[in-house]
Amino acid sequence: MTTIWDLWSEARNPPAEPTGLSFQDKAVLVTGANSGLGYASAVKYAVLGASPLILAVRSQEKGDAARASIIHETGHTGEIIILILELSSFESVNTFVNELNERVAKLDVALLCAGIVVPDYRTGSDGYEMTTQVNVLSNTLLALRILPKLRAAASSEGDCLPHLCFMNSLASHAVDPEWLPSAGQTLLIGTLNDPSKFDLTRHYYLTKLAAWFAISRIARVVEHSEANRDEHKVIINACCPGMCRTNMQRDLPWYMRLSQQAFLLPLSRSVEEGSRSLVSATGLGPESMGKLWRKSAGRFWREDGYLEPSDFLKSERGQELADDTWNEILAILQPYLDQGDFEF
Ligand SMILES: NC(=O)c1ccc[n+]([C@@H]2O[C@H](COP(=O)([O-])OP(=O)(O)OC[C@H]3O[C@@H](n4cnc5c(N)ncnc54)[C@H](OP(=O)(O)O)[C@@H]3O)[C@@H](O)[C@H]2O)c1
């Protein structure tokens, strides 16, 4: 459990700069690249030589503005590609992937930064609660659908392994087990999708937990697949930037934004500092995918080290809930997946 004093200390001790890394001529995708941590990460990749740098954003205007700003800040001379990604719709995720496949031959790094918190129950075009759709379902669909492109990079260059990195949050590891459906009741995605169970704070934490379950299960399946041996490996991990000053609370009512900002000001770090963890997570070695505990894989990079899973996550019930949630997510996504995207 993180205390206010931990946050105070973390705000004053930012993660290390990923200075030893180079992304020279690597194809790097960043989602949510027009704002906050995604934008700050894209700036770092530009400085570190990424090309093409692929900015996944919600509109051409936002992409153009981000590209102009990155060039202005860094003098980047490599290629910058803007692709439209709307995570509130599965169809849009697939349109995005089709365009990515047409425009980019291989993908060396995918850093999935886009995410939201919303103040009330609302649904996306596929009928799922919005935070669940964006933070969990669409991000998982996107990850599964870009795996072949990452694998293409693994097969073409043995010297540098491709990375699929999810920005998660410490929130996933701080869920109170009391908030969770008990065994035999509605499953986690079903609970998140139930309007009568919506609670702003809990909902955000629970979507991050569901996303973590998906990440660790994707990592587990990929790690155990024949295709992921040695030089064909894709490294899958998760990271948390710590508490950062971003626009994430934009959808909350003004009084909540104001009180949160006042509270967070002395306890948070800049997006530049937070993005150090995200970029360094995409330079970690195969150990970052290593088996952490029974049946699971995918490690969680935070504050220049690996976060230990909570007792609940390691428990029998935690593992059972992770498996149930993964199966629930897969059943929802199945109609949108291509045969051969991912071997289950
Ligand atoms: N800030 C923190 O302290 C912190 C800490 C840990 C984890 N995180 C994670 O960071 C994520 C938020 O990023 P941020 O803090 O950098 O906030 P942010 O500045 O609000 O950035 C969020 C990004 O996600 C994009 N996005 C939102 N909804 C989308 C959708 N439906 N489809 C595609 N893209 C969408 C936004 O695009 P638009 O500009 O078009 O809306 C924006 O680019 C969340 O997942 C959160 O869990 C944040």
Image: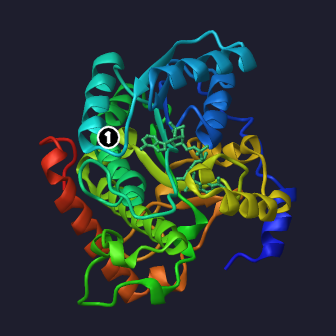
**Looking at the image, residue 57 lies above or below residue 316:** above
- Ligand 1 within 8 Å, label 1 CB: no
- x and y, in percent, of residue 330 in the image: 22, 59
Q: In which quarter of the image is residue 332?
A: bottom left
Q: Please name the residue that numbered disc 1 is placed on.
A: 147
Task: Tell me if 303 is positioned left or right of 163 in this view.
Answer: right
Image quadrant containing the N terminus: bottom right
**Looking at the image, residue 195 lies above or below residue 312:** above
- x and y, in percent, of residue 228 in the image: 32, 47
For this rendering, which residue is in front, 6 or 262? 262
Q: Can residue 166 be seen in this view?
A: yes
Q: Which residue lies furthest to the top in this view?
A: 77
- x and y, in percent, of residue 46 in the image: 64, 23
For this rendering, which residue is in front, 235 or 66? 66
Kind of residue at badge 1: Leu
Residue visible at 81% across and 61% down in the picture: 262
For this rendering, which residue is in front, 154 or 52? 52
